[in-house]
């Protein structure tokens, strides 16, 4: 209980805001190359054996990587219940599309090689492509819409109303963010294929990877310019109470503030390192593809992925989900969390279980290290995908 008393409500809120960012980054960095491999495999692999090589680079580990998505959803549900309620109801159709695409992956992995027919296998190859492209695109679309504000409102009894539509998510800025996500994860998938394959698949992955690694910072910078010129931010206009009750309606806020999403960078210039690392990581990855520096390329692109995701949180803090139709209802770090006790109990559980997950994941990657070769696939006794 001493630790509970030392960790005040505002401190726990910030800790869980940071932990949510860590979980989202972990998902993007690890499952990101799974999605990228799915997108690229129909293009970097031209024979059935080559495509099986690509699939088997991620087949044994993709389920473990997706644990971070489950943890992120669980953290939102328990630590930020209002965020969970608004986002999972407002973005219902978009999340349903992600879920359907993600379901195609395990089915594709398991069923693709069950029948030795070209049409059967080609169909599942494109299903795996969809399973990689759609989540990557929609996750980027979601981030773009969050930065612009989501059309939801709260009644005095805290009942939530979402006034938007699915096609309203497909606005120019959000689509640009979606393209950033697709290019970034395609480069990440190419970096993984370069590390885990050899021969023709590896050569083609390098070529595609170099293109996407150079395209990513161009799109990222373009999105930043568009954010500055066309997307207005939000700010709290009443006194900021960091330890108050979780009721967004107790504050006042306004939207339509030009350049507000860059205010945190102006107050703490060191934060510019976050987007700078995003650009630098992609450029180093492009160089790594050219120089055939396999591990460096994957690590550099991982830094780019992590920095790009973190840019959203850094720009918006303390906002988590702004409302474009009722700025006062915008969810912030200070008014959308669970209780002090729940945040503390969850923190203790996280301190216990996250190291276990990291240890297990590290062990799996150690066991599965090395290249996946065509000889192993053809002579694997039917154990490969």
Image (cartoon, rainbow, N blue to C red):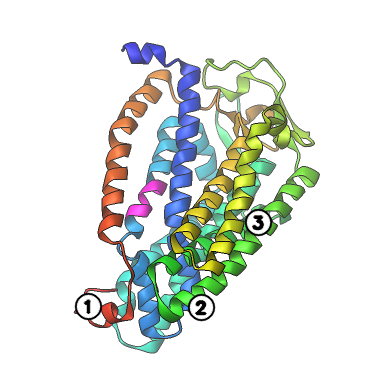
Magenta-tinted stretch: 64-69
66 displayed left or right of 272 = left
The relative height of residue 171 versus residue 50 in the rendered view (above or below) is above
Q: Pointer 1 and pointer 3: residues touching (CB < 8 Å)?
A: no
Would you identify the image quadrant in which residue 163 lies? top right
Q: In which quarter of the image is the C terminus?
A: bottom left
- 317 inside magenta stretch: no
Q: In which quarter of the image is the N terminus?
A: top left
Q: Pointer 3 and pointer 2: residues touching (CB < 8 Å)?
A: no
Instruction: Please state which of residues 277 and 218 is positioned toward the viewer in this rendering.
Output: 277
Real-space Cα separation, disc 1 to disc 3, in angstroms? 40 Å
- 66 inside magenta stretch: yes
Q: What residue is shown at x 32% (from left), y 44% (from top)?
A: 358
Q: What residue is shown at x 55% (from left), y 59% (from top)?
A: 285
- The residue indicated by pointer 2 is 43
SS at mark 1? loop
Residue 224 numbered mark, or none? none
Real-space Cα separation, disc 2 to disc 1, in angstroms? 24 Å
The relative height of residue 213 versus residue 252 in the rendered view (above or below) is below
**Looking at the picture, how far across and down is residue 266, in whole percent?**
73, 31
Residue 380 numbered mark, or none? 1
Q: Can residue 54 be seen in this view?
A: yes
């Amino acid at each position: 209980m001493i630790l509970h008393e030392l960790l005040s409500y505002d401190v726990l809120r910030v800790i869980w805001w940071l932990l949510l960012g860590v979980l989202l980054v972990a998902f993007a960095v690890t499952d990101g190359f799974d999605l990228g491999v799915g997108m690229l495999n129909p293009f970097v692999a031209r024979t059935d054996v080559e495509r099986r090589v690509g699939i088997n680079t991620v087949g044994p580990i993709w389920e473990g990587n997706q644990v971070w998505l489950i943890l992120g959803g669980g953290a939102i549900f328990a630590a930020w219940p209002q965020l969970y309620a608004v986002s999972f109801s407002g973005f219902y159709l978009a999340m349903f599309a992600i879920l359907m695409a993600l379901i195609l992956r395990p089915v594709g992995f398991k069923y693709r090689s069950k029948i030795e027919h070209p049409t059967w296998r080609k169909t599942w190859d494109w299903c795996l492509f969809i399973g990689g492209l759609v989540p990557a695109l929609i996750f980027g679309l979601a981030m773009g819409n969050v930065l612009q504000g989501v059309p939801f409102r709260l009644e005095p009894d805290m009942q939530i109303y979402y006034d938007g539509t699915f096609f309203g998510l497909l606005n120019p800025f959000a689509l640009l963010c979606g393209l950033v996500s697709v290019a970034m994860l395609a480069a990440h998938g190419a970096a993984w294929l370069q590390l885990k394959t050899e021969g023709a698949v590896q050569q083609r992955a390098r070529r595609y990877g170099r293109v996407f690694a150079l395209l990513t910072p161009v799109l990222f910078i373009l999105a930043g310019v568009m954010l500055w010129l066309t997307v207005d931010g939000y700010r709290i206009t009443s006194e900021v109470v960091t330890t108050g009750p979780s009721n967004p309606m107790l504050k006042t806020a306004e939207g339509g503030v030009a350049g507000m999403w860059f205010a945190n960078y102006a107050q703490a210039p060191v934060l510019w390192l976050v987007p700078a690392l995003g650009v630098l990581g992609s450029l180093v990855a492009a160089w790594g593809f050219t120089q055939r520096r396999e591990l460096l390329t994957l690590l550099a692109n991982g830094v780019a992925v992590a920095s790009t995701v973190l840019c959203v949180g850094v720009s918006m803090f303390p906002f988590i989900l702004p409302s474009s139709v009722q700025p006062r209802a915008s969810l912030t770090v200070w008014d959308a969390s669970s209780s002090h006790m729940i945040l503390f109990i969850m923190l203790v559980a996280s301190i216990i279980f996250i190291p276990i997950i990291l240890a297990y994941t590290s062990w799996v990657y150690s066991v599965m290290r090395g290249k996946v070769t065509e000889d192993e696939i053809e002579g694997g006794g039917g154990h490969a995908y």
